[in-house]
Amino acid sequence: MTAEAVRRPSATTSAAPVVRLCAIRDTAPSVDEVLAAIAHPAAGGTSVFVGTVRDHDAGRAVRALSYSAHPLAVDRLREVAERLAAEEPDILAVAALHRIGDLVVGDTAIAVAVATAHRARAFAACRELVERIKHEVPIWKQQTYTDHSRGWVACEH
């Protein structure tokens, strides 16, 4: 299924893709970009999630991490977003950006946004999208701890 196949008409605009932006990049995801991508005149609720690198995990101090992705990960990211949009008729627009490469504490790793007519659906859909990305998209995380040891985290794909 292509992004163009997931469309819903709006009362004020012509049919537009629901999945507006899906990318995996080696630069920091932009909150402004995901918000601009999901702008919709029927949206009464917009939910944004921004994931950042934290300084700890499972009781260990984290210094940095590195994300890597399968070559087809962006296709899988789009499929996940399209499937959610198809399952949730309240979703008007979706955007998802994930970063790969070397990151340090405080860097933005992911930014996703969902627009719906009402806030409750926006919150729920945004959370579901983040969970699906984490569990279904082949992006792997290797953490570097403050003792300079490294470990792969939740590599289920």
Image: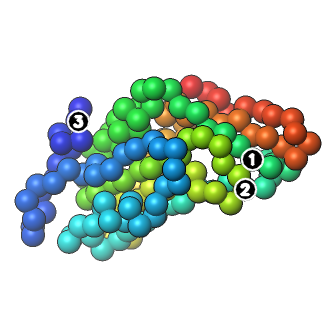
Q: Kindly indicate the quadrant of the structure image that contains residue 118.
A: bottom left
Q: Is residue 102 visible?
A: yes
Q: Helix, strand, or loop for circle 2?
A: loop
Question: Label 3 belongs to which residue?
Answer: 2
Relative image position of residue 46 (x, y in whole percent): 38, 68
Question: Label 2 belongs to which residue?
Answer: 105
Relative image position of residue 157 (x, y in whole percent): 56, 25
Q: CA distance from mark 3 to mark 1?
A: 35 Å
Q: Helix, strand, or loop for circle 1?
A: strand
Please identify, in this view, whether the residue under mark 3 or under mark 1 is nearer the observer.
1
Instruction: Identify whether 82 is placed above or below 96.
Output: above
The residue at the point 20 percent across, 50 percent down is: 17
Q: In the image shown, does 97 or 59 lie closer to the viewer?
A: 97
The disc, 3 or 1, on the residue closer to the chain's N-terminal end is 3
The label number, if any, that marks residue 64 in the structure image: 1
Name the amino acid, label 3: Thr
Answer yes or no: do the residues labelled 3 and 1 have beta carbons within 8 Å? Answer: no
Answer yes or no: do the residues labelled 2 and 1 have beta carbons within 8 Å? Answer: yes
Please identify, in this view, whether the residue under mark 2 or under mark 3 is nearer the observer.
2
**How packed is label 1: few (under 14 Cα within 10 Å), some, or many (20 or more)?**
many
Instruction: Identify whether 144 is placed above or below 1.
Output: below
